[in-house]
Amino acid sequence: MFGLSTSQLQRRIAAAAKATGLEGVSSHGCRVGMAQDLARTKEELPAIMQAGGWKNERMVARYTARERADRGAVAKFYAAAGEDRQ
Protein backbone atom coordinates (compact mmCIF):
# COMPACT_ATOMS: atom_id res chain seq x y z
CA MET A 1 0.00 0.00 0.00
CA PHE A 2 1.79 3.10 -1.27
CA GLY A 3 5.12 1.48 -0.36
CA LEU A 4 4.59 1.94 3.39
CA SER A 5 4.69 -0.79 5.97
CA THR A 6 1.80 -1.13 8.40
CA SER A 7 3.82 0.38 11.24
CA GLN A 8 4.95 3.32 9.07
CA LEU A 9 1.36 4.03 8.09
CA GLN A 10 0.21 3.80 11.71
CA ARG A 11 2.91 6.26 12.80
CA ARG A 12 1.99 8.72 10.05
CA ILE A 13 -1.69 8.62 10.94
CA ALA A 14 -0.89 9.10 14.64
CA ALA A 15 1.43 12.03 13.84
CA ALA A 16 -1.14 13.70 11.58
CA ALA A 17 -3.85 13.30 14.21
CA LYS A 18 -1.60 14.71 16.93
CA ALA A 19 -0.62 17.67 14.73
CA THR A 20 -4.28 18.58 14.29
CA GLY A 21 -5.14 18.08 17.95
CA LEU A 22 -7.27 14.97 17.42
CA GLU A 23 -7.28 12.31 20.12
CA GLY A 24 -7.88 8.61 19.66
CA VAL A 25 -7.36 8.44 15.90
CA SER A 26 -5.85 5.18 14.70
CA SER A 27 -5.27 3.39 11.43
CA HIS A 28 -7.72 0.73 12.60
CA GLY A 29 -10.37 3.38 13.26
CA CYS A 30 -9.83 4.83 9.81
CA ARG A 31 -10.20 1.37 8.25
CA VAL A 32 -13.42 0.68 10.16
CA GLY A 33 -14.75 4.12 9.26
CA MET A 34 -14.05 3.45 5.61
CA ALA A 35 -15.98 0.19 5.84
CA GLN A 36 -18.91 1.99 7.47
CA ASP A 37 -18.88 4.71 4.81
CA LEU A 38 -18.91 2.10 2.06
CA ALA A 39 -21.79 0.26 3.74
CA ARG A 40 -23.78 3.52 3.87
CA THR A 41 -23.37 3.78 0.09
CA LYS A 42 -24.89 0.30 -0.08
CA GLU A 43 -21.72 -1.50 -1.11
CA GLU A 44 -21.98 -5.23 -0.52
CA LEU A 45 -19.75 -7.10 1.95
CA PRO A 46 -17.45 -8.68 -0.67
CA ALA A 47 -16.58 -5.26 -2.12
CA ILE A 48 -15.96 -3.81 1.34
CA MET A 49 -13.82 -6.81 2.25
CA GLN A 50 -11.70 -6.30 -0.85
CA ALA A 51 -11.30 -2.55 -0.25
CA GLY A 52 -10.17 -3.06 3.34
CA GLY A 53 -8.18 -6.23 2.84
CA TRP A 54 -10.35 -8.33 5.14
CA LYS A 55 -10.39 -12.09 4.70
CA ASN A 56 -13.16 -12.75 7.23
CA GLU A 57 -16.70 -11.61 6.42
CA ARG A 58 -17.69 -11.72 10.10
CA MET A 59 -15.52 -8.75 11.07
CA VAL A 60 -16.78 -6.57 8.22
CA ALA A 61 -20.36 -7.54 9.06
CA ARG A 62 -19.74 -6.60 12.68
CA TYR A 63 -18.27 -3.20 11.80
CA THR A 64 -21.05 -2.36 9.34
CA ALA A 65 -24.12 -3.88 11.01
CA ARG A 66 -25.75 -0.54 11.85
CA GLU A 67 -25.19 0.91 8.41
CA ARG A 68 -26.70 -2.16 6.76
CA ALA A 69 -29.72 -2.36 9.10
CA ASP A 70 -31.75 -0.01 6.91
CA ARG A 71 -31.68 -2.64 4.15
CA GLY A 72 -32.84 -5.55 6.30
CA ALA A 73 -36.16 -7.36 6.29
CA VAL A 74 -37.63 -5.38 9.20
CA ALA A 75 -36.70 -2.05 7.59
CA LYS A 76 -38.31 -3.18 4.33
CA PHE A 77 -41.45 -4.26 6.19
CA TYR A 78 -41.87 -0.86 7.88
CA ALA A 79 -41.06 0.99 4.66
CA ALA A 80 -43.79 -0.95 2.86
CA ALA A 81 -46.18 -0.05 5.67
CA GLY A 82 -45.22 3.61 5.32
CA GLU A 83 -43.51 3.84 8.71
CA ASP A 84 -40.04 5.16 9.45
CA ARG A 85 -38.51 3.32 12.42
CA GLN A 86 -35.06 4.97 12.45
Image (tube, rainbow, N blue to C red):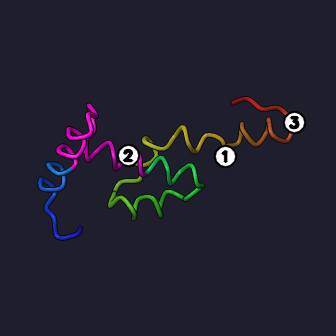
Q: Is residue 66 above or below residue 56?
A: above
Q: CA distance from mark 3 to mark 1?
A: 15 Å
Q: Is residue 71 above or below residue 81?
A: below
Could you tell me which residue is drawn at 17 percent across and 70 percent down?
A: 3
Of all residues shown, which one is farthest toward the bottom? 3
User: Pointer 3 and pointer 1: residues touching (CB < 8 Å)?
Assistant: no
Could you tell me which residue is drawn at 76 percent across and 43 percent down?
A: 76
Of the 4 image quadrants, the one containing the C terminus is top right
For badge 2, the amino acid type reads Val
Could you tell me which residue is drawn at 47 percent across and 46 percent down?
A: 36
Q: Is 24 one of the magenta-colored residues?
A: yes
Q: Where does label 2 land, which residue?
A: 32
For badge 1, the amino acid type reads Arg
Image mark for residue 54: none
Position in image of residue 25 (x %, y %)? 28, 38
Specify the segment rendered in magenta.
13-34
| Magenta stretch: dominant secondary structure | helix
Closer to us: 63 or 33: 33
User: Pointer 2 and pointer 3: residues touching (CB < 8 Å)?
Assistant: no
Q: Where does label 3 land, which residue?
A: 81
Q: Secondary structure at mark 2?
A: helix
Q: Where does label 1 land, which residue?
A: 71
Report the side of 24 relative to 66 (left or right).
left
Q: CA distance from mark 2 to mark 1?
A: 20 Å
Q: Residues within 10 Å of mark 2 (few under 14, many from 20)?
A: some
For marks 2 and 1 on the same chain, the one whose residue lies earlier in the sequence: 2
- Please tell me whether mark 2 or mark 3 is closer to you in this view: 2
